[in-house]
Image (cartoon, helix red, strand yellow):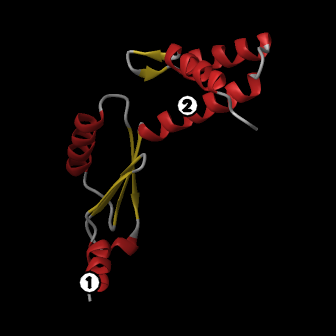
Amino acid sequence: MKLTKQARRDAKQLFRACLVNGLLDENRVRQTVGAVIARKPRGFLAILSHFQRLVKLDLERRTARVDSAVAVADSLRTSVTANLAQRYGPGLTVTFGVNPALIGGLRVQVGSDVFDGSIRARLNALESSF
């Protein structure tokens, strides 16, 4: 499906209308999608497709995944969560997971940003340098 410039503009305008204090409001998103479907303006499928992409990208930016080799202590969880909230702003959802393949350290992914302080990453970097 070809996405016109007008469809992109309309989708961005709808997306901006769904923001409340810089955060995406789920109820506004539902109401907006319902209103667009009810009105069915020209190219509404392209508008909704791009709107969905914008919402998905925003959700990814507001989701952090922290992996470690062993379960993380509560004090480290609060520290990591506070540091991520300071860097990425309010509304960040942080999930913690265990990945024994990391051997040690932490791997943090927020959207497309990846901070890899794991021993596995350091070993891979050392291996590739030889």
- Residue drawn at x 21%, y 41% as measured from the top left: 83
Whether residue 99 sits left or right of residue 90 in the image: it is: right
Q: Quadrant of residue 130?
A: bottom left
* Residue type pointed to by label 1: Ser
Callout 2 crowding tier (Cα within 10 Å): few <14, some 14–19, many ≥20? some
Residue in the picture at 72% in, 29% down: 46
Q: Which residue is mark 1?
A: 129
Q: In the image, residue 41 lies at what x, y percent?
A: 77, 14
Name the residue that disc number 2 marks: 55
22 vs 82: above or below: above
The residue closer to the viewer here, 104 or 114, is 114
Quadrant including the N terminus = top right
Q: Earlier in the sequence, mark 2 or mark 1?
A: 2
Residue 91 lies in quadrant: top left
Image quadrant of residue 81? top left
Label 2 amino acid? Val
Label 2 to label 1: alpha-carbon separation: 40 Å
Residue 42 in the image: x percent, y percent?
A: 78, 17
Q: Nearer the viewer, mark 2 or mark 1?
A: 1
Residue 75, percent from left and from top: 20, 48
Residue 110 percent coordinates (x, y): 38, 46
Q: Give SS at disc 1.
A: helix
